[in-house]
Structures are given as structure tokens and as C-alpha cells.
Image (cartoon, grey):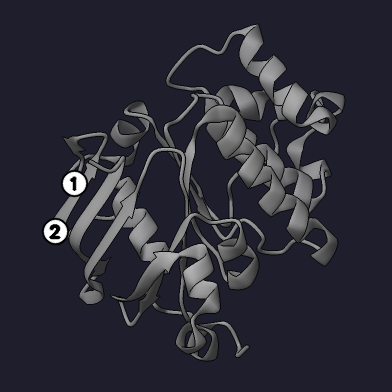
Amino acid sequence: MALLEARGVVSGYGDAEILHGVDLDVEDREIVTIIGPNGAGKSTMMKATYGLIDCWAGTVTFDGEDITDLRADQVTERGMCYVPQRENIFPTLTVRENLEMGAYIDDPDPADFEEVWERFPFLEERENMRASAMSGGQQQMLALSSALMIDPDLLLVDEPSAGLAPDLVDDMFERLVQIRDETDTAILMVEQNARQALAVSDRGYVLDMGENRFEGSGEELLESDEVADLYLGGA
């Protein structure tokens, strides 16, 4: 059984159905990327998985438990965290306060902070700085660190490279691989920077018009002429 199993997920906003029966799996310690054109339903799938919006049909199972109808806070308590693309930190709080908020379901101990400082030394240097004073890349690393404070089994990340300077994009993907390798946390991400995301992914899914179009290993999707032509800007 996969760590995360989504079957036939139908969801949307208001009267607009965006997802029309999407299937998706994430195994333990995998990095899985969802790619596709704008409006394909990628972020909607993440939100439906995490309980931020309702599943109108279908099921979502996490670690063997049906979480389809659970709220996001209840999903978090079971070991899944979500880092949205925007508004993913508390800008008026300090770095340390943001990390404390990330651990809201469990009192953090010094070891939790030490793990963050070891992984991201620049955060320790800015421990008492307001998050709003940091660069966009530093804020994104803080958002990831805050989500990791509860030692989740699965981390959902929406567009982790969005808004980053080109020289920081490679670093972001390297950090995600590092997080997977060092914490055993599986990662499901949505990413427009498809080539680089698939290059570090165990598997990937292509969504189009709210439906599964392709799936396979990251390498298989990168080598597919059809995927390249339709979704990766050609060879």
C-alpha cells in the first residue's frame, strides 16, 4: 500500500468542477512531481488531498487511513504538511516564532531547532529577525523548515521555485532531495519548472484539463517525446 493513495478525486470551487477523477500515489521516501499546463488542476489536487477544499467524489488514503473528509488540521495531525506557493510564512514574526508556529501541534524541543540550524545555518543567524526582512529564497527555506518541525511523513509543496532567482532554483531542488534523504519524508510537489523537478523526482504525473494524461518515472517523462512536445517546451 502506498503512503498516499488518491482515487477518482473530483473537486473544484463553487460550481466549477476542476478535477474530473484524478488518481495519484506517493510511496514512502519518494519525490513525486505533478506537472501540466496552467489551469490543469495541479494546485487544486494538492488542496483536495490536504483537506483545504472538499473532495466531491473519490477517496484519499494516507498511511492506510481514509482522510477524504478530514479537515486540514486533522490531516496535519496524522503526519502530512502543506507549503503553499504564497503566504507560506508569518512575515511579522521572527524566524524562531515561525518555526514555533510550524510545530503548533506538538511542543518543539531544542533538538527540533538544532536540526533546522544544521540544515539551514543562515536561519540560525537570523533567528530573531522578522521573516519579512529576508529574501524570497530565504523565506521559502523558512516555510519548508516550519513544515518539517513536526517531522511529517509527507510534505506537499506547491511551486517551490516560484519567484526565485535562477541561481537559487537549483539550490531549492537540491534542498528538497536533501530533506527526503535526511528525514525520510516523502515529497509531493507541483512545479512549473518541469524539467528540473522531474530530474530530481522518482515519479511524476501530468495533469491536463483536470484529468490524468501521463504518468511514469521522472526519467521516463523527461525522455517522452510526446510529453516534451506538449508540456516541456519541446526537446
Q: Report the disc number at residue 166.
A: none
What residue is disc 2 on?
Answer: 58
Q: Quadrant of residue 64?
A: top left
| Sequence-first tag of 1 and 2 | 2
Q: Residues within 10 Å of mark 2 (few under 14, many from 20)?
A: some
The amino acid sitting under disc 1 is Thr
Residue 229 position within the rendered picture, expressed as x and y whole percent measured from the top left: 53, 91
Residue 85 position within the rendered picture, expressed as x and y whole percent measured from the top left: 56, 57
Look at the numbered discs 1 and 2 and tell me whether their residues touch, using CB distance below 8 Å: yes
The amino acid sitting under disc 2 is Gly
* In the foreground, 12 or 22: 22
Which residue is depicted at the point 57% across and 82% down?
232
**Vertical placement of 39 versus 23: above or below?**
below
Which residue is depicted at the point 17% across and 44% down?
69
Q: Quadrant of residue 118?
A: top right
Q: Quadrant of residue 22?
A: bottom left
What residue is disc 1 on?
Answer: 68
- Answer yes or no: is residue 90 visible: no
**Vertical placement of 24 versus 229: above or below?**
above
**Vertical placement of 58 versus 179: above or below?**
below
Which residue is depicted at the point 49% across and 81% down?
224
Residue 95 position within the rendered picture, expressed as x and y whole percent measured from the top left: 73, 29
Which residue is depicted at the point 25% across and 49% down?
5
Residue 105 position within the rendered picture, expressed as x and y whole percent measured from the top left: 42, 21
Q: Quadrant of the C terminus?
A: bottom right
Give the side of residue 55 with respect to residue 185, left or right: left
Query: What whole-number distance in Å separates the C-alpha atoms at marks 1 and 2?
Result: 8 Å
* In the foreground, 220 or 55: 220
Give the side of residue 63 with respect to residue 231, left or right: left
Q: Quadrant of the N terminus?
A: top left
* In the foreground, 211 or 142: 211
Q: Secondary structure at mark 1?
A: loop
